[in-house]
Amino acid sequence: MSNTALAENDLDPSPRETVESAVVRFAGDSGDGMQLTGGQFTLATAFAGNELATFPDFPAEIRAPAGTTFGVSSFQINFGSRVIKTAGDAFDMLIAMNPAALKVELGGLKKGGLIIVDTGSFGDRDLRKAGYDANPLEDDSLDGYQVIPIDISKLTLEAVKESGLSKQEALRCKNLWTLGFVYWMYGRDRQPTADWLNAKFNARPDLAEANIAAMNAGHTVAETMELPDGIHGYHVDAADIPPGTYRTVTGAEALAWGLAAGTHLADIKMLFASYPITPASQLLHSLSKMVDHDVVTFQAEDEIAAACAAIGASFGGNLGVTSSSGPGIALKTEAIGLAISAELPMVIVNSQRAGPSTGLPTKTEQSDLYQAVLGRNADSPLCVLAARSPADCFDVAIEAVRIAIKYMTPVFLLTDGYIGNAAEPWNIPDINDYEKIPVQFRTDPEGFHPFQRDPDTLARPWAIPGTPGLEHRIGGIEKDFNSGHISYDPENHQKMTDTRFAKIEGIARDIPVQGVEDGTEMGKLAVVGWGSTYGPISRAVSNLRGQGLDVSHIHLRYIWPFPENLGDLLKGYDQVLVPEMNHGQLVNVLRAEYLVPAEGLNKVSGQPFKIIEIEDAIRAKLGN
Amino acid sequence: MNVVTPSEKLTPKDFATDQEVRWCPGCGDYAILKGVQKTLADIGAKPENTVFVSGIGCAARFPYYINTYGFHTIHGRAPAFATGLKLANPNLDVWVVSGDGDALSIGGNHLFHLLRRNVNLQFLLFNNEIYGLTKGQYSPTSRQGTRSPSTPWGSLDNPASAVVFALGAGARFVARGIDSNQKHLPGVLARAHAHVGTSFVEIFQNCKVYNDGVFENFTGRDVAGDRQIYVEHGKPLIFGADQDKGLVLNPKTLTLDAVTIGENGVTEDDILVHDETNKIIATLLAHMEPPTLPVALGVIYAVPGQSYEDGVGEMVRSHAQAEKPDFNKLLRSGRTWTVG
C-alpha cells in the first residue's frame, strides 16, 4: 500500500461545506471498538491541525450482554478551527452501530443532525434487545434527522473477504469500515491509522490488512455513494494554534508524566503505591512502565497498604505517591492522618467518580472535595489541588510534588474520571523550562531533632534512615514541639495543632494570586469553578460576554489553602455562582471562609456540564 | 592519610533510648526488649541503618525504646509501611514489632502479603493472647472460652495459630521463642536477622495485668521440660525434663507422636531428625499443642529465597536503560506533530 494512495486527494471534486466546528459521537456495543475508533479519529483530527476535546463514555461492565442499552460504549469528539474547550453539547453526527446505541444516544443529537447506522445490526433480535418494539429506521422515529442507513456489517464482510478471516474476526473490522466512512466525511488522512494498525497487529499482518481494507472500503463507499439530499462532506480549517511540538494526551497520561517530572525536578525517586480501582488504574499502568525515570510502582494488597507503603517510602527518602478513587481514598484516610502527623511528603491522587459507595464507577463527578479538604478524623489540615483539563494534570502534578516536599505534607491532587479519560492536544513543554525542586535531606546531627522547623515554611527536616547521628523515633502520637519526643502535654498539643494549621495556611503565600480567567476583576457575576468544569464554564462565559453580559470566570487550582486574594476578589462581585458536579461543596467552603453569598449550580448525573446549562444559569442570575 | 579507627563495639545499653519505658511492671515486653537490645549488640547492628517499625498496641511502643530509627505507624499497617520503606531503601535493616491483635486481627491481611512477598525484614509477633492496651478484650489468639470485658461468658471463636498462619502464607522463616527465656531468644533473633526474606518470629509474651499465666501450661517450671521442645536443624527432636522423650512420625496417621526413649523398644535412632528446610515437618511441629505434644520452639522452618525488594531491583535494572534518558524524550514519545 503506497502512502499516496491513502493521502487525501487534493482534487477531491465533491463539494464540501466548511464548518467552524463539529461534534461527532461514535456509539456501539462495548465490543464494537468505539473507544479505539474515537481514539484514531482524534489522532487524525489532531494531525489535521484542529483544536479538539474528547469524551469517552463507557459502561462499568467489561462486556455487558451484547446489544443491550447498558452495554453501549460511546466516544464523543468536538473539533474545530476555533478554540475548543469541551467535548461539545449536542452532537452534529451520531454513528450508531446497533439499535441500543441509537436508542441511548439519539437524545443527544442536534435536531436535523446526521445519523449513520449499520442496518445490518438492526435485525428483530437486535431490536428486541435494545427494547424497540418496531424498527426505528422504518417508522417515524427518526423524522427530523438525516439518516444514512448502510449495511456496514455486510459491506465489511465483502471488503475483507479475501483476508481469509473467520466471519467473527471479519465483523470486528466494522469499526474501521465506519471510521473510513467518517474520515471521508471530514476529509481526514487515513495514513496514521494504517500505520497504527500495522504496528498494532505486527504479529498478525492478516488482521492489519483486513482492517486497512475495511477502512479503505468505507472511505470509498462514502466518496462514491449517492448521499441523501443535503448531505455532503465537510471541511474544517486548521485552527490557529501556537507553534510547538504537539501530541494528544489524556489526563491519566499527563498526570503520570507530571508526577515523574516532579520527582525528576526534585532529583529523587518515586514510589507509586496503589490498588486497582476504576477510573484511577490507568495511572498505575502508565507509571509501571517508567522504570527509566526512577519510578517504582507497587500494586499493594489494598488501598490502606498502598497509602502506608507510600508513607514508608517517603520516610525512606523517596517521594511516596498513592492514587485511588473516592471509595479507596476513604480507606486511606487514617494513613493520610499519619502522614499529616508525622509530617512527611506524600501525594494522593483522587480520580473522582460518581458515588456514594460504589456509585457509578465509570461516570464522572466532583463530589470528593469535602473528602479531600475535610474528610479526616481530628484537625488534619493538608493541601488540596485540582486539575482542570487533561493537559493541566501535568503542571498540577509538578506543583503537588513541589508543595509536598517543600512543606513536608501530604498533598491531595483531585482529578476526575472525565479528565482522566478525555484527550486534548498538548503543546509539549520543555522540562528544562521548569524550576528545580530543591530537596535537602538533613545530615548534620548538631542540635537535630525531628520536629525542628524551618522558620519560614514551618516544615520539619527530612531526616532519612541511613544517616548517622539522626536516629529518631516518630509516629502518630503527638510530638513535643521542642524535642520531637512523645508528648501528652495539653499546651503542647494546642501548639502543635496550631502549627500544623499555620504551616498549611502558609502555603497560600507561596502560590500565585488568583486571577480572573475571562472577564473583569469586579462586576455583577463571577462564575467560580474548579476541576473539569473548566471547559463548559469558560465557553459559556466567553459566549455570554460576547453577547455583552457582565459575567466573569474564575477557576481555582488551589482548593486548600485558597490563594490569599480570593476572598477580596469574590467580594468585588454582586453575585457568585459555583457550578460543580456535586451537590454543593466548593460553594459551601467559599461561603464558610469568606461569608460571600455564593450559590451553587449542581449536577450529579455522571455526565459533564453542557455549555448551555451553564449559560442558562448565568442568564437566570443576571435576569437576562 | 586518614587513620581509620575501628568503631567501638556497641553494647546492649547503647541501643537503649532516654525515654522512660511505659509498660506495666512485670510485662513480658521488658524481657523481649532486653533480648532484642542484646541481639542488636551481638550482631553488630548499625543504629543509623536500623529501623524499628510498629503498628498499634502495647508492643507497638517498642521503637521508642530502641536507639535506632523508628516509626510507630497505625493499627495493623506496619507491614505495609515497612514494605514501602524497603522498596525505597533496600539496604536498611528493618524490624517490625507487632502483637496478636495488630498482626492477626486488624493487620492480618498485610501480614499475609508481607510473608508471601518475602520482604527482607524481621517480623516479631508478641503474642499475649489478649488486647492489653484497650484493657483486656480477647484477641484472635485467645483460647476458646476466654472471659474478657467483651466476652463475659467466654469467647466463642477458634483461636488462630500464628506460626501455622505464617507457614500457610508462604513464610520462608518461621521461629518461636518465649519472653522469659533469655538464653534462647537472642539466638533465635540472630538467626532471624541473618535470614534473607521475611523472618517471622512468634514470641510468647506474658501480659501481667490482663492475661497473667496464660502460658503456664507449658512455661511453668513444673511442666516446661515436658511441654517444650527446642528444635534444632539436623538434631533429633528430643525433649523432656530428662531428655528422654522424642517425636516420631506415625506413618499410619501422618502425625507426630511423642514417645519415650527406652520404652517399647524405642531408641534414639527412631526419633525424627529436624530438617528446617522441610515444610511438612515444619507444619507438623507448628501444629503441636500441649498436653499431648510439646510446644515447638526455635527455628521451625528456614528456606532463604530472593526478597521482594531484590526482585524489584533486578526487574528495574533489567528493564531500565543503562543511562537515564532525557525526560523530554519521554514526553515526545509516540505520535507527535509540529505546528508553525
Image (cartoon, coloured by chain):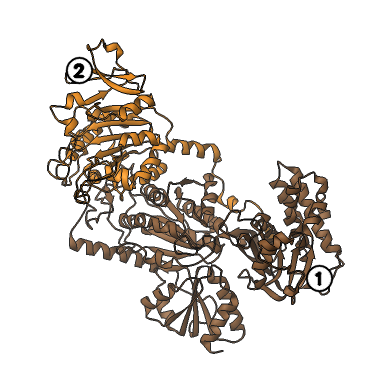
Chain colours: A brown, B orange
Task: Say which amino acid is labelled 2.
Answer: Gln
Question: Which image quadrant: the C terminus of chain A?
Answer: bottom right
Direction bottom: furthest residue: A623
Judged left or right of residue A118, residue B325 is left
> Is any part of residue A236 visible from this angle?
no
Q: Name the foreground residue: B186 vs A290.
A: B186
Marks 1/2: CA–CA distance:
99 Å
x, y (%) of residue B263?
22, 12
**How many labels sit on residues?**
2
x, y (%) of residue A91?
67, 71
Judged left or right of residue A23, residue A567 is left
Callout 2 secondary element: loop
Judged left or right of residue A258, residue B225 is left
From the image, state whether disc 1 or disc 2 is nearer to you: 2
x, y (%) of residue A186?
76, 66
Q: Chain for mark 2?
A: B
Q: Quadrant of residue A70?
A: bottom right
Q: Name the foreground residue: B147 vs A29.
A: B147
* Point 42% across, 58% down: residue: A329
Contact flag, marks 1 and 2 (Cβ < 8 Å):
no
To which residue does mark 2 refer?
A: B243
* Point 60% across, 78% down: residue: A612
Q: Is residue A86 above or below residue A474?
A: below
Task: Say which amino acid is labelled 1.
Answer: His
To which residue does mark 1 refer?
A: A232
Q: Are marks 1 and 2 on the same chain?
A: no
Q: Name the foreground residue: B226 vs A201.
A: B226
